[in-house]
Amino acid sequence: MGLRINDTAPDFTAETTQGTINFHEWIGDGWAVLFSHPKNFTPVCTTELGTMAGLEGEFRKRNAKIIGISVDPVQDHHRWQDDIETATGFRVEYPLIGDKDLKIAKLYDMLPAEAGDSSEGRTPADNATVRSVYIIGPDKKIKLVLTYPMTTGRNFEEILRAIDSIQLTAKHQVATPANWKLGDDVIITPAVSDEDAKARFGGFETILPYLRKTKQPSA
């Protein structure tokens, strides 16, 4: 059975471009974004890794670490970093996990158990399902999973937007509507009575009996 929201993110020990890590220890008491790639030296992934490098400061503002994983050895990751900088102008300073034995890809249910035990000889198409993003909270629970096809580059501004929503709604009894961004009105959850809503938020607008909007509370 695949991983679901609120499942504990599987822990692992792995080699990265910044040395050996234990995943849960590396996350610490903050947030983490784990994003996976089917193969090194592939065009879409090259742009994605550079984009993430350019946004690392934005993730840091949200107390979120970023870490990549690709189904290749760490020594290949070091060579790939030069290409990423050439293509995007950004140097990858965050860790990249090596998964030459496919263990982590299987642990996160991105590859089936029968996929083998070596990245050697495998093509990007063989690893096409290793294209997921996981947002993981300080409690080590999975808060979001997104999986993309190989031909569609990921929108990491959406990942930032999702983190903003997840962090806000974890603190207040609100939800965020479609296309919400920081500063927009939010939805009061059904668990909050009208009386409590007035006390908490100072006022609200009733759109439908089950849909009430209010100003975004302070993050």
Image (cartoon, helix red, strand yellow):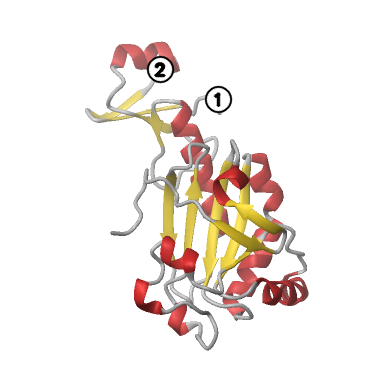
* Residue 160 appearing in the image: no
Q: Is residue 191 above or below residue 84?
A: above
Badge 1: residue crowd in 10 Å (few <14, some 14–19, many ≥20): few
- Relative to 178, say whether 13 is above or below: below
Q: Nearer the viewer, residue 99 or 69?
A: 99
What residue does disc 1 label?
Answer: 218
**Which residue carries the number 2 mark?**
203
Q: Residue at x 49, y 73 (%)?
A: 152
Q: Measuring 50% from the left and 25% from the top, which residue is drawn there?
A: 217
Q: In the image, is residue 26 above or below residue 193?
A: below
Looking at the image, is mark 1 or mark 2 earlier in the sequence? 2
Count of marks, rendered view? 2
Instruction: Give the residue type at disc 2.
Output: Gly
Depth check: give the residue in front, 114 or 205.
Answer: 114
On the image, the x and y values in percent for residue 183 come to 54, 35
Q: Residue sitting at 39 percent across and 46 percent down? A: 178
Residue 154 in percent (x, y) is at 52, 65
The kind of residue tagged 1 is Ser
* Residue 52 in the image, given as x and y percentages of width and height: 65, 59
Q: Nearer the viewer, mark 1 or mark 2?
A: 1
Point 57% across, 65% down: residue: 69
User: Which numbered tag is attached to residue 86?
Assistant: none
Work out how far the residue at label 1 is from the one at label 2, CA to CA, in angstroms. 15 Å
Q: Is residue 173 found left or right of 64 in the rendered image?
A: left
SS for dot 2:
loop
- Residue 45 spot, x, y in % from top left: 59, 73
The single residue placed furthest to the bottom in the displayed view is: 121
Answer yes or no: is residue 22 visible: yes
- Of helix, strand and loop, which one carries label 1? loop
- The quadrant of the picture occupied by the N terminus is bottom left
The single residue placed furthest to the left in the displayed view is 209
